[in-house]
Amino acid sequence: MTSASLLASGEAFGDAVDLARKTRGLGLGVHLNLSDGPPIAAREAVPSLLNNAGEFEGARMACC
């Protein structure tokens, strides 16, 4: 493996960071997520990106 990308709000982010730390010379890219899953910032910090419930508009959230 020579490179990988990380999604900070992804479900496996913590595990991916651990693996990246153990893999010397691994090139890393970061994907910004502005539309899916739970936001990592409070609604007040990014009101133009989130709806009144503090979720991304049109986000595909897992239910129940």
Image: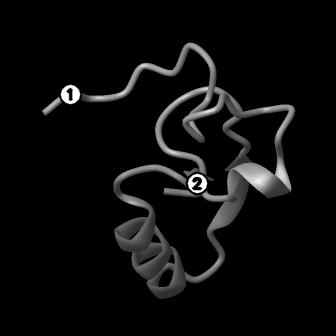
Horizontal side, residue 54 vs residue 20: left or right: right
Say what secondary structure mark 1 lies in.
loop
User: To which residue does mark 2 refer?
Assistant: 6
- Residue found 49% across the figure and 74% down from its top: 17
When the figure is inspected, residue 37 is found, relative to residue 14, above or below; the finding is above
In the rendered image, the quadrant that contains the C terminus is top left
Question: For the residue marked with disc 1, what is the amino acid?
Answer: Cys
Residue 32 coordinates in the image, percent (x, y): 73, 43
Residue 52 coordinates in the image, percent (x, y): 64, 32
Question: For the residue marked with disc 2, what is the amino acid?
Answer: Leu
- Residue found 35% across the figure and 71% down from its top: 15
Observer-nearest of 25 and 44? 44
**Can I make out residue 3 in this image?**
no
When the figure is inspected, residue 57 is found, relative to residue 34, above or below; the finding is above
Say what secondary structure mark 2 lies in.
strand
**Can I make out residue 35 in this image?**
yes
How many neighbours does mark 1 have within 10 angstroms: few (below 14), some (14-19), or many (20 or more)?
few
When the figure is inspected, residue 49 is found, relative to residue 4, above or below; the finding is above
Residue 3 coordinates in the image, percent (x, y): 61, 54
Q: Farthest residue toward the left? A: 64
